[in-house]
Image (tube, helix red, strand yellow):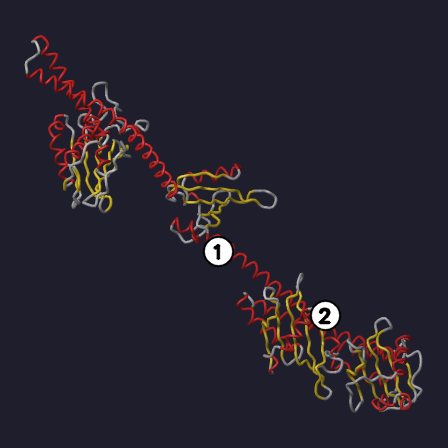
Amino acid sequence: MPSLPAAAALTRLLARADRVADLLPRLHDHLVEVTGGRSSVLLQPEPRTGVLLATSGSHLDDLPRDGWLASPAEQRAVAQAHAGAAPVVIRQAAEVSPTLAARLGAPHALIVPLGDAQDPQGIALVGLDSDTPPGPPWDDTLAVADALVLALERARLHREADLQRAMRDLLDDFSRAASSAAALPGALGDVCRGASRLFSAEHATIWLHDRDARELVRAGAAGTGDDVLAGGALADAAAAALRSNRSELVDRGGEGNQPRYTLAVPLRGRRRALGALVIEGVHLAPGGSLDVVERAEEAGRQLSAALENLQLIEQVRQSHRELEDTFNSLADLVLVCDTVQQVRQVNDAMAARVGRPPRELPGTAASRWLGPALCALIDDVAGGAGALVQQVEDERLGGIFQAAVSPIRVADGRPSGIVLVARDVTERVRLQEDREDLQRRLAHADKLAALGKFVAGIAHELNNPLQGVLGHVELLRAANAFPPSIQREMRHVHREAERAAKIVRNLLVFSGSRRLDRRRLAPATIVSRVIALRTRALRERNITLVREVHAPLPFLHADPLMLQQALLNIVLNAEQAVADRGRIGIAVGLIEPGMVRIDVRDSGPGIPPDILPHVFEPFFTTKDVGAGTGLGLAIAYGIVLEHGGTLSAATHPDGGAVFTMTLPAGDAAPAPRRRRR
């Protein structure tokens, strides 16, 4: 066991020394004292080569930086000391190891092992003047050796603590600065400056692997010298580090006893290589490479974690931006709410539809923006109805929508919200309705055309015998050829024959068999003539007739008598539909340049939906038997069609029937649409 004074001195020294730089010279002095030596030097193995290099010494004129124990005999002595865990004396060192003797300045040498055979920490060399130093049990000498090991371990722990603190500060600064991909180059530049200081280097560069381009890109640099801007050697070092799992310390030469190194540190994430940190111009003191690789590994691990976290955050941000852009690029209206119809999120289309910025809608009630129909769908889905797709009309959003309402479920299947996707189909529905209406009108026109062809044939066949009957009856009446007893009956025959002839003429008008006598005609003139014809009859029935003419109106190129007949038939139909003290309105205006519109609206009961498709058919009437022939509206339809216009009927939303006549204006009127005969 070491002597009590020696043990107490070592304990006080280890406990009170603040810095290893102050501790090691004192321990060297203790070692020289307990061995009776002249000088001492501490040798530690270089981790890459195992060569023992001098790291500190005492009572030496010089501390050479190259290998000390290079001869086989010296290496055997070192191995013997570690194997026996006891000092080994090299007597007559001037003859056995002249270089060693010269460096120690003593004729003999003592090799003191540090650590044990399983974990050798190096050796301490003591220069001896006497070849009989204090012998076994070497307690005091080994006590100093243990103190040296503790001092070295303490130095290592201090270095690690300093490294951890420096790396933490550096990475904290990096994390604060690298808030986005745009700020990454500046943050990596700060890391490079910190790495240069941390490793006492001239400059540092960080290279990141671009997976899309499959190349290394310099993302940050700091330091001095042209090599910072040059790509060749540094890029090669970065590429080599990218393919490696360990940091590499490469000797680049140097001046004198100060070697110059390049330190290449791979940056690797959990699943892939991220890049490399290349530190150029690292100047190491003897033994300084003992922990530089470990420090580089630790720096690489922490920087890799920070970089990977930043990349993951950026990927999440990018994915969020893409999803948000996709969400807002949808032309459909999208609203996401919870199960109690509180809005969580809307896309730009929905926000624009309700006329509010998107940020104002979250947190509000969905019923504030949606009508009852859509809210009812959301309620059904919230109640467990599953996904629903339905066409609804929403007065709040102002249109007809194809709405798809679906539950949003979490991992365990519970509903966490509801998403509404509403596509505005108002225009499509309107076009579909217009298409169906056009198809109905075309079918009706085809039906009337076929009927007109049939009627025209019958009318022509009936007209000739009727004219013969009328002619003979008139001749016989003129010759007074009838006995007085049958003259009354013959007048009845003549009257009924005239009535039949009139029906035939009307049928010919409906079928388009009468040639039009077109003239330049003002629309207001036609209206005035019809009103003049019916004013007295309307006054007797207390029916108010209101005329509304929007001037100026273009002239029509039409047959005045035929057009007057058509409008008169429509007004007569309105009179019969209106009860006493009713109202008939005639409005004339333009619906587009070159197209005149005449509306006749009555205050009657309107037209039932089942009757509406048949109102223009010949002989179709809702009047009592004998009250009408069912040809009035059919004749009006045929006349308007012959003028190249259209005639339609509908029930007005406010009640009553409305007949709309459209006629082309001017000399550029289209050719009449004649039926085939």
Where is residue 567 shown, x and y percent of the image?
Answer: 18, 33
Amino acid type, residue under disc 1 in the picture = Asp
Residue to which mark 2 is pinned:
246
Work out which residue is located at the far top of the displayed protein and give it: 485
Return the residue nearer the eye: 156 or 102.
102
Q: Tag 1, which secondary structure?
A: helix
Residue 90 x, y percent position in the rendering: 91, 85
Q: Residue at x 20, y 43 (%)?
A: 665
Q: Amino acid at mark 2?
A: Arg
Whether 152 is drawn above or below 332: the answer is below
Quadrant holding the C terminus: top left
Between 625 and 631, the one lying in front of the other is: 631
Q: Is residue 191 above or below residue 647?
A: below
- Judged left or right of residue 15, residue 323 is left
Q: CA distance from mark 1 to mark 2?
A: 42 Å
Give the image location of residue 287, x and y in percent. 76, 80
Q: Which residue is mark 1?
A: 325
Q: Secondary structure at mark 2?
A: loop
- When the figure is inspected, residue 233 is found, relative to residue 215, above or below; the finding is below
The image position of residue 279, as x and y in percent, is 65, 76
Task: Give neighbour class at mark 1: few <14, some 14-19, many 20+ (Cα, 10 Å).
Answer: few
